[in-house]
Amino acid sequence: MRHFDPALLADVRLQPCCWCSRRAPSEAAHIYAKGMGNSRQIDLPWNVVPLCRECHQSSHDGQLPLTFDLLAIAAQRTGLFQAEIENLYARMMKADKTCVVCPDCGGNGLFDETGPGSTFDCGRCNGAGILTQSGEPWRE
C-alpha cells in the first residue's frame, strides 16, 4: 500500500518545524512509518508534518516529539480528531486501501486501489460512493 504525493512533501518542507518552530526548510516527517523500501508510504496531510532535522531524529530515537504529540499536531492542522486519524490508518493497513476526499462532508473516504468504478466509504459521515473515470468520488 502506497500513496505518494511529491507536491504535499514539497509544501511540508517549506514550513517551519511544528515542534520547535525552527525556520524552514523542514523534513517531511511521517507519523506512521513508511516501512522498508517505502512500501507503506502514506503521503496524506494527516500523516505528514514538518519537523526540523533535530526534532525528526529525536522522534525516531523515541524522544519528544512522540507519535501521540505528532498526532495531536496533525489533528489540529487537518481538522480531524486524533481517533479519526488512527482509524483511517488502521483501516488503510487492514484492507490495503487508499484515501479520497468525501464529496459530502470533506472527510477521508477509503477506496480499493482498483481505479475508476471502485467503491469508497467515508470514515466521518459513513457515506459511500464510487470513483468516476476521472478518479473523482461520486455519489448516486
Image: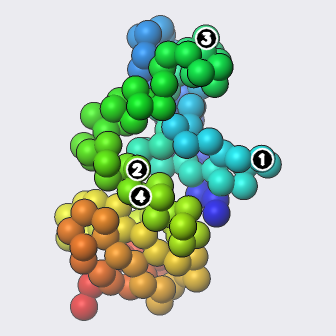
What's the distance in space between the residues labelled 2 and 4, CA to CA?
A: 6 Å
Q: Quadrant of residue 87?
A: bottom left
Please give the label number shown on residue 88.
4
Q: Nearer the viewer, residue 45 or 60?
A: 60
Q: Quadrant of residue 138?
A: bottom left
Say which amino acid is labelled 3.
Glu
For marks 1 and 2, the one nearer the N-term is 1
Numbered badge on residue 61: none
- Look at discs 3 and 2 and give the one toward the viewer: 2
Separation (CA) of disc 1 from disc 4: 21 Å
What's the CA distance linking mark 3 and mark 4? 28 Å
User: What's the amino acid at mark 2?
Assistant: Glu
Left or right relative to 51: residue 76:
left
**Residue 64 picture location, percent across and down:** 50, 16
Q: Is tag 1's residue or tag 4's residue first in the polypeptide sequence? A: 1
Residue 73 position, x and y percent, is 35, 30
Q: Give whichever of discs 3 and 2 has the lower sequence position.
A: 3
Q: Is residue 106 left or right of residue 91?
A: left
Q: Please give the name of the residue rendered at 46% of the width and 64% of the height, measured from the top-left corner.
A: 91
Quadrant position of the N terminus in the picture: bottom right
- Residue indicated by mark 2: 86
Mark 1–mark 3 distance (CA, rounded to whole Å):
22 Å
Question: Which residue is denoted by mark 3 in the rendering?
Answer: 54
Residue 14 visible in the snapshot? no
Q: How many marks?
A: 4
> Dot 3: within a 10 Å radius of its alpha carbon, few (fewer than 14), some, or many (20 or more) residues?
few
The quadrant of the rendering that contains the C terminus is bottom left
Element type at mark 4: helix
Please name which of the two marks, 3 or 4, marks the residue nearer to the observer: 4
Q: Callout 1 environment at 10 Å: few (<14), some (14 to 19), or many (20+)?
A: few
User: Could you tell me which secondary element the residue under label 2 belongs to?
Assistant: helix
Disc nearer the start of the sequence (3/4): 3
